[in-house]
Amino acid sequence: MKTRNSTNWLITALITLGSLVILFPLYMTVSIALKNPEEMAQSIFALPTGLHFDNFTRAIEATDFFSAFKNSFIITFCSVSFVLLTNSLVSYAVARNMNHKFFKGLYFYFISAMFIPFQIIMLPVVKLTTDLNMNNVPGLIILYIVYGLAFNIFVYVGYIRSIPLELEEAATVDGASTYGTFWRIIFPLLAPINATVAILSCLSTWNDFMLPLIILSKPESYTLPLVQYVFQGQFSTDYNLAFASYLLALAPMVIVYIFAQKWIINGITQGAVKS
Amino acid sequence: MAKKKAAFYTMTIPALLLFFLFHTFPTLQGIFYSFTNWDGYSDSYDFVGFKNFASLFTDGNVLNAYMFTFKYAIVVTIFINVLSLLIALGLNSRIKFRNFFRGIYFLPNVLGVLIVGYIFNYIFANAVPMIGEKLGSEMLATNILGSEKWAWIGIVIVAVWQGIAFNTILYLAGLQTIPRDIYEAADIDGAGTWSRFWSMTFPMLASFFTINMVLAMKNSLMVFDQIVALTGGGPGRATQSIAMLIYQGGFQGGEFAYQSANAVIYFIVIVIISVVQLNFLQKRELDA
């Protein structure tokens, strides 16, 4: 019984050791991003002696960082906002009509898409988006919103079905429309699951590489991960420039994570337990 | 009532149409082209029946890609699940700074896979060989990604380093659903740590184990970003995954129809593996 209440130092030590394995590549990233070639020649592991912020100014210029950041931000912000507003609405209609053939069929139709590997639609979808003049930022946003349905319907429907019907029936008696009932009564109740969906879609959209790679045709609409790929040739001769650029690309999400860490982990934990 | 029904239809039909246009229609197109000989840019093409499918089974590059992807996916799935379960158990026990460590272990999940791949590419190419030279180890002194035999291990390391983050959080969520008092009962019975884990903790995590195994397997079977950042499929074709082969052959190799057929097979393989995995793991859940 004694061990139950006192700190287990052996496990604390092992967990600390493991966390060093997680942190080592990040330490390398930050320290190389701040060094110059002379310091690199002495030791690639040591802490930088001076802080060479000019690596960052060079990286910002070389990759047009602010343009890529703006694209990534617009794409992520718009996709996540519309995913929350539209996917929850569709899920509501489906969840409240699961006894109806059409809506039940719709549920399985969307969910079964989760098993279709992206590679099967990858080649035709490039043709399609080019023909529709959608090989740009708005086109990419639409694809993220539509593709999100497969997974999000699964998460939302489970949650909505656990909300008692009485609330909505009372609203209907008061003369509220179906849309009004959803936006005023149901949507606010979805806050916890909206958080889960928002976090997961935000991370996957911000970090996605494949869809921007095949859809975006013009360099001025490139996202942060895509820019790292495009400039790889230039980076291979200049590690300090490369790592400054990697760090700039990773930093926005890491900063958000540091401030919202508890909220993000709880959001995912809650989603996992509920569904 | 009819008005209410109408509202439910207007909520879903636009989504249905958009989903059909951007997902189902391209899927059907992909299947359609797999029976042709289209290269992706010519004006005309012919139907060739099942010729593409027949060729796939005798194509050395395709077999090579499937072998690599399966080997990689199985090893990654096992390592991710064993390690993340161990870490979750550690984080769930009486340790100092628990929330801080939980934050560290989840951190890789917020980083882009491609960029993490580039960082590790540098570590494998420069940092590890430097340590190897100091230690006088010939094995470590060379870039693992340059070795036809061992490059896949490098990709496994990166995928596991990053993949354990999400699974650890899911296992931790599972561990927190287990009531504390069942352990106290076990203490009275005098159960050891090991038997307590196998007889109590692990069975109660069964549904989390199923989800984590299926997720890790599905993600690894689709491996693409890591390969782009680490090896580009090389050396030679040693680390060319199925997704990479379809991308390279379809977009750059003029094999649109042929790789569409490959994607159809890939789809069938993923469905079969997912169904088998789910059946097997859920049966195990019931037995436990």
Image: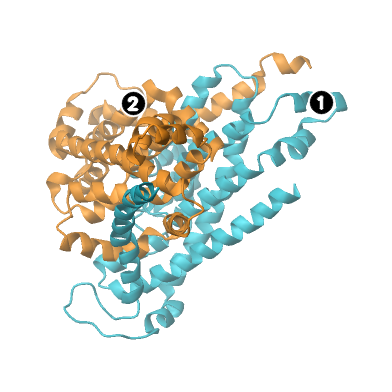
Q: Nearer the viewer, residue A98 or A34?
A: A98
- Tag count: 2
Residue flagged by tag 2: what amino acid is it?
Val
In the image, taking residue B190 as reference, residue B207 lies left or right, namely left
Q: Is residue B180 above or below residue B204?
A: above
Kindly identify which residue carries mark 2: A256
Q: Residue at x 61, y 21 (%)?
A: A12
Q: Is residue B218 above or below residue A176?
A: below
Q: Nearer the viewer, residue A22 or B197?
A: B197
Q: Residue A254 in the image: x percent, y percent?
A: 35, 28
Colour used to depict chain A in the structure image: orange
In the image, taking residue A197 as reference, residue B252 lies left or right, namely left
Q: Residue B131 in the image: x percent, y percent?
A: 45, 36
Q: Nearer the viewer, residue B273 or A8?
A: B273
Kindly identify which residue carries mark 1: B185
Q: Is residue B173 above or below residue B13?
A: above
Q: Is residue B288 above or below residue B278?
A: above
- Which residue ends up furthest to the right in the rendered image? B189
- Distance between the alpha carbons at the discs numbered 1 and 2: 42 Å
Chain on which label 1 sits: B
In the image, taking residue A165 as reference, residue A71 lies left or right, namely left
Q: Secondary structure at mark 1?
A: helix
Which numbered disc covers residue A188? none
